[in-house]
Amino acid sequence: MSCKLSTAPINISSGINNPGGDQTNLSYDYGLASCSVTNKGTYLDIDCFDGLNKVEYDDIGFLEVTGVRLYSPSLNTYDGFKADAELIITHSGGGKNFYICIPINNSEKSGSSANWFSQIIPYSPNRKNSAIPINVSNFSLNSVIPRAPYYIYDKGTFDWGCNAADKMLIYHKNEAISMKNKEYRKLRRLINPASYNVNSITEYITFNKKGTKAGPGASAGKKAGKGMTCTPIVDQDGNSLENKEAQLSWTGAPPDDSSARDAYNKARYKYLWIILAIIGGILLVTGLGYAFFYAFKKRSPQGQPATSTG
């Protein structure tokens, strides 16, 4: 496919640190999916995203996954070097394409990404343009998203998107996910390297330091629960019941705050003394009962001996 607007792949330098700001935040939560794979000769077309996916990029809005490609070696370069492989997830929304580019290292390191690839690559078709459905278990794109900082390439587009308004999210090779050697060797037998010119321009590239460290369901650079308002519960005097509950709960560990800890200890000893007083009261009543019983028995008249008559 010919595209005069294509500006990717690119070289990502670890020296880029221009902050992207809130408009470069990403939130994601990909659902479970069934799977089929097509061998395209220079990449695997992985159609495994039919689940309920919740993806939002602040500068675009909500996004829909439209394609997943697996290349080996990578299309993008990192400080001038290619990664062993690269997974590129294409999303669409708001008339734009949004690409997430994830470098992959050939490694014996175990993890969710290694398991993800082990469910696909061994069963992928050998022949070009052939497709095959694959049985997968607990399969989600969440497993291949690094929990790491990322770069944003504004105006970055591949030839299959070909839109000047597109954007790219790229993880550095230092944050690469893992593919075990067995799957990597099989992948290299399945596909040939793709031929692309690498763009060395660094204009329009920014850095999001927090990235996707929070994982699925949380937005980068923001606290979880965005937009949620919590209303405190108070008593008739306007005092927070949450604080009281924390002070009166003496079954767990004491709070770290010194004043809260003092209140915690007072509450604990207060209830301890109440319990001891109840136990003492029971013992006292029991003791008095026995005392009255023996005193009454001692003062009662004894039986008289029998007398004979004759």
Image (tube, rainbow, N blue to C red):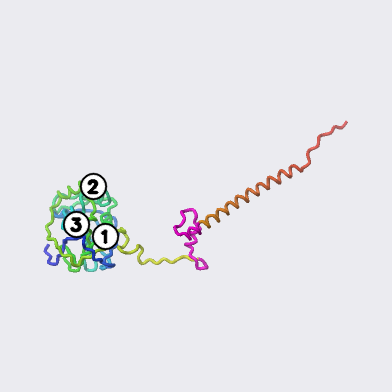
Amino acid type for the residue under numbered disc 2: Glu
Image: 181 above or below 79: above
Nearest to viewer (mark 2 / mark 3): 2
Nearest to viewer (mark 2 / mark 1): 1
Q: Which residue is mark 1?
A: 149
Amino acid type for the residue under numbered disc 3: Arg
Q: Reading the chain from its start, which is encountered first: label 2 or label 3?
A: 3
Residue 66, visible in the rendered structure: no
Assess whether residue 240 is covered by the magenta stretch.
yes
Horizontal side, residue 150 vs residue 126: left or right: right
Amino acid type for the residue under numbered disc 1: Pro
Residue 41 image point, x, y percent? 13, 54
Nearest to viewer (mark 3 / mark 1): 1
Q: Which residues are magenta?
A: 235-264
Q: Reading the chain from its start, which is encountered first: label 3 or label 1?
A: 3
Q: Which residue is mark 2?
A: 108
Mark 3 burial class by Cα count in 10 Å: few <14, some 14-19, many 20+: some
Question: Which residue ends up furthest to the top in the rendered image?
Answer: 310
Q: Residue at x 50, y 61 (%)?
A: 244
> Which quadrant would the C terminus be assigned to in this image?
top right
Q: Residue at x 71, y 43 (%)?
A: 294
